[in-house]
Amino acid sequence: KKITEANPAFVRMFGYSEEELRAMQFRNLIFPPDGEGAGSLPSELRYVTKDGRIIWGRLKVSLLHDSRERGFMIVMVEDITAWKEMQNALRESEERFREIAQRSFDMIYTCYTDRGVTYISPAVMRILGYTPEEMIGVQCCDYVLDESWPAWQEARARIARGESVEGLIVKLRRKDGTVVAVEMNESPIIEGGEVVGTQTVGRDVSDRKHYEDLRLQAFYQIEQNIEQFAILADHIRLPLQVILGMADLIDDGGASERIRGQVARINGIVKQLDEGWVESREIREFLRRNELV
């Protein structure tokens, strides 16, 4: 159809004067590869401006008749170029994120309050033993062990307030029934001002947790040893004083001397225990100062 009239906004959008537009057909403005889609209403099409730029427009057409029953169309084209560019940038960003997530060793997933898991990376197979397809639609809380439930609930409360959660360690039940410790960093998904889900990155820290437990056990053993050193030394010293006193009462000088020699030897061992107690205490204080326990 030939253009018979154009308003100032249409003129500014395409860069032609109204006189130039009146000499053109509307289809001349449509980017050629998109021309076949112009019949669907409404249509999002690409158009070519006078200076050769390609813009996006949303087309709406109304068919009217005049008093002599002659038909004509009122065409409205809304410039949606900025919106399209934003959509394309968002799509590219999502594709890059998905590509990174697909190759990540960490388990990355999005979980909505009403829909459960909508996306989870392939790393879930290594960490939990499930395929991504098996996890779609489930709620992650179903895999949390009872001992981790209080920490999990506290994190849910923070997410509900719109806060992020870092370093949350929970124990999850794997597909084969074994347990895995997972460290999670979570961010709330907010839509329309409301928290509707979480985006989470989870990492298997089972080995690290095991070594941390061993470290705590070792420190506990040091504490126990320190107490035992002190108690043992006290228990030995008192009987030695009694034995030494009895040696002084014995008339046999040789026997008395031998007893004193043994007492001195035992005192030497007790001294070594004291030195071990001091060394263990210094090790404990070093560990505490350096936050290793």
Image (tube, rainbow, N blue to C red):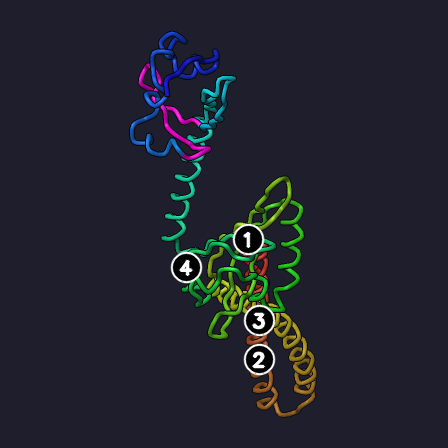
Give the mark nearest the N terminus, 3 or 2.
Answer: 3
User: Where residue 266 is drawn, which disc sits there?
Assistant: 2
Q: Is residue 129 above or below residue 286?
A: below
Where is mark 3, residue-wise? 221
Q: Residue furthest front?
A: 68
Residue at x 56% of width, y 56% of height: 115
Quadrant location of the N terminus in the rendered image: top left
Where is mark 4, residue-wise? 123
Q: Is residue 3 above or below residue 257?
A: above
Foreground: 190 or 159?
A: 190
Label 4 crowding class (10 Å Cα cut-off): few <14, some 14-19, many 20+? many
Give the mark nearest the N terminus, 4 or 2.
Answer: 4
* Pointers 4 and 1 in contact (C-beta within 8 Å): no
* Foreground label between 1 and 3: 1
* Foreground label between 3 and 2: 3
Give the mark nearest the N terminus, 4 or 1.
Answer: 4
Where is mark 1, residue-wise? 167
| Residue 119 screen position, x and y as percent | 47, 54
Distance from Cα at disc 1 to Cα at disc 3: 28 Å
Residue at x 52% of width, y 65% of height: 215
Distance from Cα at disc 2 to Cα at disc 1: 52 Å
| Residue 200 screen position, x and y as percent | 52, 52
Element type where label 4 sits in the image: loop
Distance from Cα at disc 3 to Cα at disc 2: 25 Å
**Is 111 left or right of 245, judged from the image as shown?**
left
Distance from Cα at disc 4 to Cα at disc 1: 19 Å
Task: Confirm whether the magenta stretch covers residue 148.
Answer: no
Element type where label 2 sits in the image: helix
Residues shaded magenta:
40-57
Q: Is residue 87 above or below residue 165?
A: above
